[in-house]
Image (tube, grey):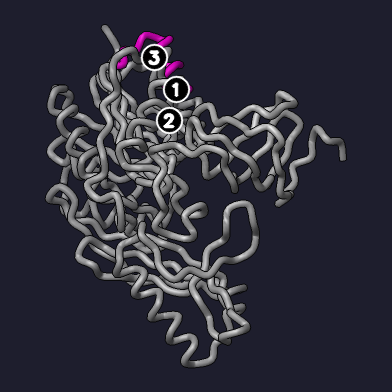
């Protein structure tokens, strides 16, 4: 295989004769530097301005490398000691203060949207920056010295397993329940290799559901959970899609609700609706159509719509219901990381709905979609960032657009 197409996991320690300066943080979370060869390198465990003496190379391509910084000549003043030993795998930005994280995420958003938005982008911090996750999936690790199973994760850049003793990003009830399950496995002498992983989810009342996934067996059906968001109750499966950080999600929904109030349209089309938490939370007083393709999520969507006579759930791909897009309506979008299907964007451009509210978990693909809309006559009225996942590089961005008549 040619070097051009090679993409290997290397795990090779590299010592540098000349310290490598980190220029800035990439949208993907790593620090960016330039090697003496001129090749770009993306390093985890780095902050802007730091000088790296050695790193662990975990990936190499013809035009760039990726790795994990290990030793430094100089560290940044904003660097702090991470809470968790496994931080690089679960939340690699534990190395910086909350204020510096907000500053860096705002800078990333500003750079990504520099051609589309020229005002300051508001950044909304999560009400909880620790113990905010309501879902966690663990691996199991067998310690041959203690002859016991332990909770584990996969270290970044490795297929191995790293046992963990504590974790600061998920709700405490989840970690406590996970430890109890592991204690039961050790008490009964069960072998860790029988299981693929352990998945648990908690609602806002601290009730935990989920369990073990056995290897070579279908995933079990777990007890549904229930949560109340903006005065609307939702049921959902622990192993299905549901927002991870509900406190921050409520901030977003409140903002979407305010945006919708400003538009007199009586119809709302909620695409990529999941179990319905956007549409049913912010537009249940209007003629509401919700579209979801996943059959499991759609089952929950139907249940959540039962008490809302104005809501109509539809099982379909969002790009396959283009006839539902009308000029005199509001369209809400919450697509996966890949962004919106091109057919959907083209139909939005053709029909020109009154308002488009676009929530994205990947601002990179959102920029691509917004550029197409704006270049075809849409106006970007507002743009905001929300910290759904503190101590990680992930950013949720909310954009509101309208077409001029």
Q: Is label 1 in contact with label 2 (beta carbons under 8 Å)?
A: yes
User: In what element is the residue under mark 3?
Assistant: loop
Q: Residue at x 45, y 34 (%)?
A: 320
Q: Residue at x 56, y 35 (%)?
A: 51
Instruction: Estimate how packed mark 2 is, as few (under 14), some (14 to 19) or many (20 or more) residues with alpha carbons within 10 Å.
Output: many
Q: Nearer the viewer, residue 11 or 182?
A: 11
Residue bounds of the magenta highlight: 367-380
| Marks 1, 2: nearer the viewer | 1
In the image, residue 161 sits, relative to residue 122, either above or below, namely below
In the image, residue 290 sits, relative to residue 26, either above or below, namely below
Q: Quadrant of residue 60?
A: top right
Instruction: Give the image location of residue 75, x and y in percent.
Output: 49, 39
In the image, residue 166 sits, relative to residue 28, either above or below, namely below
Instruction: Give the image location of residue 114, x and y in percent.
Output: 41, 15
Q: Quadrant of residue 140?
A: bottom right
Question: On the image, numbered disc 1 is attached to which residue?
Answer: 112
Return the disc, 3 or 2, that comes first in the chain's sequence.
3
Q: Is residue 259 magenta?
A: no
Instruction: Give the image location of residue 371, x and y in percent.
Output: 44, 16
Q: Is label 1 in contact with label 3 (beta carbons under 8 Å)?
A: no
User: In what element is the residue under mark 2?
Assistant: helix
Return the disc, 1 or 2, that comes first in the chain's sequence.
1
Instruction: Estimate how packed mark 3 is, as few (under 14), some (14 to 19) or many (20 or more) residues with alpha carbons within 10 Å.
Output: some
Q: Is residue 379 magenta?
A: yes
Q: Residue at x 47, y 48 (%)?
A: 92
Question: On the image, numbered disc 3 is attached to which residue?
Answer: 116
Majority secondary structure in the magenta region? helix
Cα gap from disc 1 to disc 3, whole angstroms: 9 Å
Q: Residue at x 33, y 16 (%)?
A: 352
Cα gap from disc 3 to disc 2, whole angstroms: 12 Å
Question: On the image, numbered disc 2 is attached to which residue?
Answer: 363
């Amino acid at each position: 295989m040619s070097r051009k197409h090679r993409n290997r996991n290397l795990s090779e320690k590299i010592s540098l004769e000349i310290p490598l300066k980190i220029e800035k943080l990439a949208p993907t979370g790593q620090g960016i530097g330039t090697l003496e060869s001129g090749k770009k390198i993306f390093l985890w465990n780095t902050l802007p301005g730091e000088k790296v003496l050695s790193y662990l190379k975990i990936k190499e391509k013809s035009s760039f490398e990726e790795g994990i910084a290990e030793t430094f000549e100089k560290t940044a003043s904003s660097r702090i000691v991470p809470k968790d030993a496994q931080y690089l795998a679960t939340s690699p930005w534990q190395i910086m203060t909350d204020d510096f994280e907000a500053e860096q995420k705002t800078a990333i958003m500003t750079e990504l949207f520099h051609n589309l938005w020229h005002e300051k982008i508001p950044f909304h911090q999560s009400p909880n920056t620790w113990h905010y996750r309501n879902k966690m999936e663990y691996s199991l690790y067998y310690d041959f010295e203690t002859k016991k199973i332990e909770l584990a994760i996969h270290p970044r850049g490795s297929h191995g397993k790293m046992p963990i003793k504590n974790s600061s990003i998920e709700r405490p009830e989840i970690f406590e329940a996970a430890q109890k399950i592991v204690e039961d496995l050790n008490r009964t002498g069960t072998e860790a290799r029988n299981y693929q992983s352990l998945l648990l989810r908690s609602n806002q009342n601290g009730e935990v559901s989920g369990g073990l996934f056995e290897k070579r067996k279908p995933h079990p059906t777990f007890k549904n959970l229930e949560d109340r968001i903006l005065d609307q109750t939702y049921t959902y499966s622990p192993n299905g899609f549901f927002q991870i950080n509900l406190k921050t999600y409520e901030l977003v929904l409140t903002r979407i609700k305010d945006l919708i109030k400003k538009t007199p349209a009586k119809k709302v089309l909620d695409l990529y609706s999941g179990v319905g938490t956007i549409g049913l939370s912010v537009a249940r007083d209007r003629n509401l159509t919700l579209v979801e393709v996943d059959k499991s999520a759609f089952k929950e969507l139907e249940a959540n719509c039962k008490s809302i006579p104005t809501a109509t759930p539809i099982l379909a791909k969002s790009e396959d219901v283009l006839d539902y897009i009308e000029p005199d309506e509001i369209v809400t979008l919450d697509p996966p990381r890949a962004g919106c299907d091109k057919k959907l964007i083209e139909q939005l451009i053709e029909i020109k709905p009154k308002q488009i509210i676009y929530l994205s978990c990947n601002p990179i693909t959102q920029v691509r979609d917004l550029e197409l809309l704006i270049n075809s006559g849409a106006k970007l009225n507002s743009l905001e960032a929300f910290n759904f996942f503190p101590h990680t590089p992930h950013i949720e961005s909310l954009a509101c657009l309208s077409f001029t008549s």
